[in-house]
Image (tube, rainbow, N blue to C red):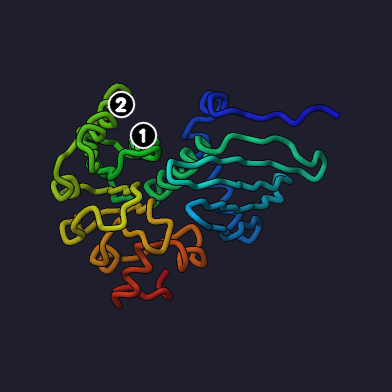
Amino acid sequence: MSPVPHFTEEQIAELCDLETVTDWLERAWRDLGAGEAATTLRVRAAASGLMGSAMAASWPRHQVVGGKLYLTHPDGFAFLVGLFSPDAGLVATFDGLGLTAIRTAAATALAVRHLAPPDAATAAVFGTGIQSRPHLEALAQELPLKDLRVWGRDPGKAEEVAAWGRDRGIPARSMADSDEAVEGARVVATVTSSYTPVFDGSLLDPAALVCAVGSTKADRQEVDSTTVQRAAFVVSDSAEGARTEAGDLIHAAADGLFDWDSL
């Protein structure tokens, strides 16, 4: 029996580009929406500062099943992805940190592709962690950007992310004030782990698209309830999962400003 190949972070970075991943994710989500693919909700097991999480998906059109298992601990994450097929069993395993980053950015890219205001040229990214750089790339991929603001709690890190973007031809600049960063932005992406809102939702452009990425736990809240209340509509990749994980929506619902039936 041949050994199962394992793809490292370096190999994944070399093989995967954001535009291709975005196009494939769109195909997968179209099948998911048509009932021709399936995903699980995330399950978590947590005790004494350590947490294990897992999720899986099935895509019959391509005869594949995949799963992600990962560790969360005070100093970071460790991910492993497995891919299976009926013919081969376990096809391959993958380091999961880079895959998670590019898949998440691809989801934002799809939202921007289909929901952003026409000719949106000003955008903002809130956050300076592992998701920030892929999101600069996602916004630049989908928008005719003239001004991309980057805000973070640490101004030095915000400038590092903005400089990374400028080195790649993205018109990025760091902003010290979060409210100034959001004013006039037509697309806003939040990729933080914040437990308190990172900007004042009353300052949003009325037509702005907000891609709220980071609040993946019930007690997190990147965007305030005002932002949710002002939204013409709210979209999630899993309406069921959002009820237990989308902290922004959970807080807004608790404030009486969001109706789950509208999701």
Query: Residue at (60%, 40%) from the top-left corner?
Result: 80
Is residue 95 found left or right of 60 in the rendered image? left
Q: Can residue 22 be seen in this view?
A: no
Earlier residue among tags 1 and 2: 1
- Judging depth in this view, the residue of 155 and 60 nearest the camera is 155
**Circle on res. 17:** none
Q: Residue at x 24, y 37 (%)?
A: 148
Residue 225 makes an appearance in the image: yes
Q: Distance between the residues labelled 1 and 2?
A: 8 Å
Quadrant for the C terminus, please: bottom left
Residue 109 appears in which quarter of the rendering? top left
Label pair 1/2, CB-CB below 8 angstroms: yes
Using the image as rendered, state which of residue 227 and residue 195 is in the foreground.
Answer: 195
**Mark 1 packing: few (<14 Cα in 10 Å), some, or many (20+)?**
many
Mark 1 secondary-structure assignment: helix
Q: Where is residue 38 in the image (x, y as percent from the top left)?
A: 64, 57
Which residue in the structure is indicated by mark 2? 164
* Residue 133 disc label: 1
| Residue 126 image point, x, y percent | 28, 45
Is 242 rendered above or below residue 194?
Answer: below
Q: Residue furthest right?
A: 1
Mark 1: amino acid = Arg
Location of residue 151 with respect to 250 vertically, above or below: above
Q: How many discs mark residues in the rendered view?
A: 2
Could you tell me which quadrant the N terminus lies in?
Answer: top right
Apparent side of residue 196 relative to residue 103 in the rendered image (left or right): left
Check disc 2 and report its element: helix, strand or loop.
helix
In the rendered image of this protein, does residue 111 appear above or below residue 162? below
- Residue 212: x, y in percent? 35, 54
CA neighbours of label 2 inside 10 A, class few (<14), some (14 to 19), many (20+):
some
- Residue in the image at 29% along x and 24% along y: 169
